Image: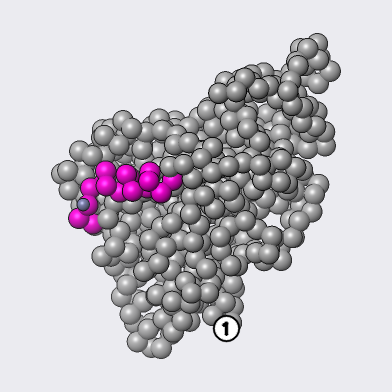
Amino acid sequence: MSSSRTVIRGGLVVTAADEIHADVLIEDGRIAALATPGSDAAESWTADRTIDARQKYVIPGGVDAHTHMELPFGGTFASDTFETGTRAAAWGGTTTIVDFAVQSVGHTLREGLDAWHAKADGNCAIDYGFHMIVSDVHDETLKEMDLLVSEGVTSFKQFMAYPGVFYSDDGQILRAMQRSAENGGLIMMHAENGIAIDVLVQQALDRGETDPRYHGEVRKALLEAEATHRAIRLAQVAGAPLYVVHVSAREALAEIARARDEGLNVFGETCPQYLFLSTDNLAEPDFEGAKYVCSTPLRPKDHQESLWRGLRTNDLQVVSTDHCPFCFTGQKELGRGDFSKIPNGMPGVENRMDLLHQAVVDGHISRRRWIEIACATPARMFGLYPKKGTIAPGADADVVIYDPHAEQTVSADTHHMNVDYSAYEGKRLTGRVETVLSRGELVISEREFTGRAGHGVYTPRATCQYLN
Ligand code: URP
Ligand code: ZN
Ligand code: ZN
Ligand code: ZN
């Protein structure tokens, strides 16, 4: 551990709670102090490195609580490794990811978790934690959940979709929820009625409807809403909190809003793709729509305003990426002639902080809300706060110097994700990451990568810190 001291001078420090002009002192990888620029305290600081943040924001590093590096899906693997994916995350101002380890059917949680540790260990540029995908609920699995919680894997994803792969039936879901009510775990739900969707998929294919846009048509908003409602009531019966991942339909959001009005510990996450893209993208000709195939699917444009409102009213608390990239060439193309064979998922880990800053510029959310939904709340939701998600004495010095005036054009030609297209190709954005520190070490320095694979460490998590 180096005893280096860094001072960041003259920036506007933005957290979920405050916006203050302050100098920031970093010592031994942690935030040591904040002080008014020009004050005796700030003037007395000596440092090995001084970063000039005048005209810039000084914000906590982003916490992306939903990524899938190297996820096996549909006979292929998500194209970002932990090395390439965490490097790209850093370029985009994210300093912590929580990725999903996978239990496959017939195997233990431990086997899945060990496999994901092996993929990530020594390869990450930024810190990381794990959720656990539970695909096979039985007595042993439930016991293992207790152990995982005690090891800092405090959240578990279940799927109401993908029968035969990740799918859990209502009984399995209820049992896992009952267990998490006891052990403090948080169930994260992929809420889509996969049994009904599979019927609609087959009927569409039988009619010769094979293009990517039919992916959006069969995965109906009503079937997202129905599953969301069912998950909420199962959680209520179990007395467990519930976090609904990748909410895309306004009807599903309405179920979450109703549950929250009832005082339930029900939370919702949405993703940039649902806020900025729509079924218009899925309908792009020449199979280009395959680039936008993910589940839950993109919705008609008029859902976006409901999602933005949900983010403002706190019916949605978190924006994560669900980063799950597949190259167009060779991977998305597996589904030419059959949309159901297109691997599900989109790239975005590098774009989230910038897209949400654009939402500040466009007036959808405030600057502090930007930091709340992208840094502070995901850290609280998943037991990483205040180590991650804020700038305060004692917190890890995961800090981004953000230039709110810089202009950029998003493109696969310049991004750092290991994928051959950008979902936001050509989109012009105001604001850009300039410098990124992870535990006080420079990972991005004035738009140059200065980090290294292996700097990032596994970060065990406490249980949810966001309960009513
Ligand atoms: O399409 C998606 N979202 N792929 C990743 C797996 C999941 O369901 O989150
Ligand atoms: Zn096994
Ligand atoms: Zn999912
Ligand atoms: Zn996902």
Quarter of the figure with the C terminus: top left
Q: Is residue 323 above or below residue 326?
A: above
Q: Is residue 39 above or below residue 48?
A: above
Q: Is residue 363 left or right of residue 144?
A: right
Secondary structure of the magenta portion, mostly?
helix
Amino acid type indicated by mark 1: Asp
Q: Quadrant of residue 209?
A: bottom left
Quarter of the figure with the N terminus: top right
Q: Is residue 116 magenta?
A: yes
- Residue 332: image location, x then y, percent: 48, 73
Q: Quadrant of residue 56?
A: top right
- Tell me where the magenta segment starts and ends, as one range: 105-120
Residue visible at 49% across and 65% down?
326
Residue visible at 65% across and 58% down?
415
Q: Return the residue at label 1.
A: 286
- Residue sitting nearer the eye, 220 or 19: 19
Is residue 302 visible in this depiction of the protein?
no
Q: Quadrant of residue 33?
A: top right
